[in-house]
């Protein structure tokens, strides 16, 4: 299998075929980071991050299993799907995804994409669900090459990814958005080993897959977007071993989940989108161990990562209107450091991953208008200058996000 970049590809890292011509005065002033980066190709020696939510290939894309998060792109015009295998400040290899025979394979806009790791080999795989026809397909990935497997169709159902029996093979929780029915496929590779109907939960409730008690088996956090009620199902395979309500918070409050004191019991960070108030529920399984207000953050969305690599979840707050961002480094449920993380202009959008594999979350920035991309390799609260990556034209969008 060749991992070489294909010089004909639109997403190739060859600047002649990919970089959109941008006047020099619009380029980031630190382009030298990108130009000089080829001299620093040594593998990182730092230990892997202990936070399983950040290092799992089922959750954070890593198509070649090298511990460095990768980027997936979809083309809204051609249906092509492409990958950048990342190597810190460089794109290590880049191409459109092909099958084992070297043929391009495509998926049009009707296909919703979710990532998982169906065969437990620590290489991210893709689950495709056609929102019009209900067709399903898995692409088991090895770097830039996919092996395709069709699953039975599920019309009217939406997939959620988890590992409910803890065997490190991704399973699929299906939610029917009309009837509120739920069903679980336990999977081994691309084989459906069991298909079970679970309790129905009315459609005002939205499901988030988390591992509440750190036993390696994912559970479900439920939030009712109409009433503000919250509840948790602890799961063991297809069994709901406990179902408990948590306190109600009105629907202005938005939840992010992470391990904010490092005990690998899922905690909940709340942000009130109307008032900017924040508060943190440190959880012990389904019990709230503490309920602590944190600083007010207005007009921003939260994204989670671990910027200093200690296994405790940190937060990036980003205001898409102003382009202003800030990082909260968390320890033991408190904000212990804060640093600015502003975009060059407000047209840039951040996403997070560990692109150099040092266990510390980095920032990937994209300006879809100009097609420019940049990366910031983070080390705790130091905020280095961004390094430019090759530009990618605007019909390509982040495959892990809905089309803008
Ligand atoms: Ca990788
Ligand atoms: Ca895999
Ligand atoms: Ca499983
Ligand atoms: Ca990193």
Image (cartoon, rainbow, N blue to C red):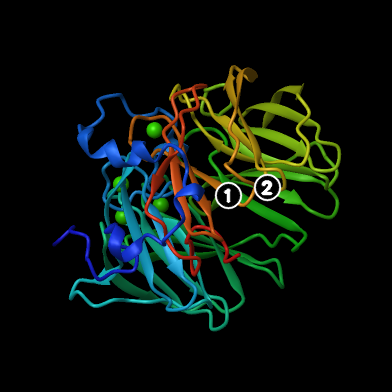
Kindly indicate whether the residue at mark 2 contacts the one at mark 1 (C-beta within 8 angstroms): yes
The extreme left residue here reads 1
Tell me the crowding category of disc 2: few under 14, some 14 to 19, or many 20 or more residues within 10 angstroms, Cα based: some
* Side of 140 where 222 appears, left or right: right
In-image side of 56 versus 221 (left or right): left
Taking the image as shown, residue 398 lies to the left or right of residue 291, namely: left
Determine whether 347 is above or below 32 in the image: below
Quadrant, the C terminus: bottom right
Under circle 2, the secondary element is: loop
The count of marks equals: 2
Q: CA distance from mark 1 to mark 2?
A: 7 Å
Residue located farthest toward the bottom when viewing the structure as drawn:
133
Rendered image quadrant of residue 41:
top left
Residue 99 coordinates in the image, percent (x, y): 24, 72
Where does ligand 2 appear, by image quarter? bottom left
Residue plotted at (73% across, 49% down): 223
- If the image is split into quadrants, where does the N terminus sit? bottom left
Which residue does the image show at 37% across and 59% down from the upper left? Answer: 19
Q: Is mark 2 within 8 Å of ligand 4?
A: no
Q: Residue at x 72, y 48 (%)?
A: 321
Look at the numbered disc 1 and give the secondary structure of its residue.
strand
Mark 2 = which residue? 320
Q: Is residue 298 left or right of residue 140?
A: right
């Amino acid at each position: 299998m060749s991992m070489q970049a294909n010089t004909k590809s639109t997403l190739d890292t060859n600047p002649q075929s990919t970089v959109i011509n941008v006047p020099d005065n619009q380029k980031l002033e630190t382009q030298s980071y990108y130009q000089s980066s080829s001299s620093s190709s040594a593998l990182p020696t730092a230990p892997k991050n202990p936070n399983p939510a950040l290092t799992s290939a089922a959750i954070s894309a890593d198509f070649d299993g090298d511990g460095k998060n990768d980027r997936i792109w979809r083309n809204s015009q051609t249906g092509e799907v492409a990958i950048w295998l990342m190597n810190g400040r460089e794109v290590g290899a880049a191409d459109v995804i092909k099958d084992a025979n070297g043929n391009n394979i495509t998926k049009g806009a009707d296909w919703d994409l979710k990532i998982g790791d169906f065969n437990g080999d620590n290489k991210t795989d893709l689950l495709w669900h056609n929102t019009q026809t209900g067709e399903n397909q898995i692409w088991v990935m090895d770097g830039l090459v996919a092996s395709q497997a069709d699953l039975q169709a599920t019309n009217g159902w939406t997939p959620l990814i988890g590992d409910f029996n803890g065997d490190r093979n991704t399973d699929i929780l299906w939610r029917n958005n009309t009837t509120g029915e739920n069903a679980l496929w336990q999977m081994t590779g691309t084989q459906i080993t069991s298909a079970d109907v679970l309790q129905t939960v009315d459609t005002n409730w939205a499901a988030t897959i988390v591992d509440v008690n750190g036993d390696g088996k994912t559970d479900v956090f439920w939030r009712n977007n109409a009433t503000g009620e919250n509840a948790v199902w602890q799961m063991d395979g297809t069994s709901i071993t406990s179902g408990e309500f948590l306190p109600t918070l009105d629907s202005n409050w938005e939840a992010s989940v992470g391990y904010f004191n490092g005990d690998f019991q899922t905690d909940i960070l709340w942000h009130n989108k109307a008032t900017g108030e924040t508060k943190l529920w440190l959880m012990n399984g389904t019990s709230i161990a503490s309920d602590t207000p944190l600083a007010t953050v207005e007009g921003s969305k939260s994204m989670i990562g671990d910027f200093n690599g200690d296994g405790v979840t940190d937060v990036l707050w980003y205001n898409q209107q102003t382009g202003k961002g800030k990082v909260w480094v968390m320890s033991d449920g408190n904000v212990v450091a804060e640093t600015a993380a502003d975009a060059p202009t407000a047209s840039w959008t951040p996403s997070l991953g560990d692109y150099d594999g040092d266990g510390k979350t980095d920032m990937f920035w994209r300006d879809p208008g100009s097609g420019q991309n940049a990366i910031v390799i983070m080390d705790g609260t130091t905020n280095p200058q961004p390094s430019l990556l090759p530009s990618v034209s605007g019909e390509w969008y982040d495959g892990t996000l809905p089309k803008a």
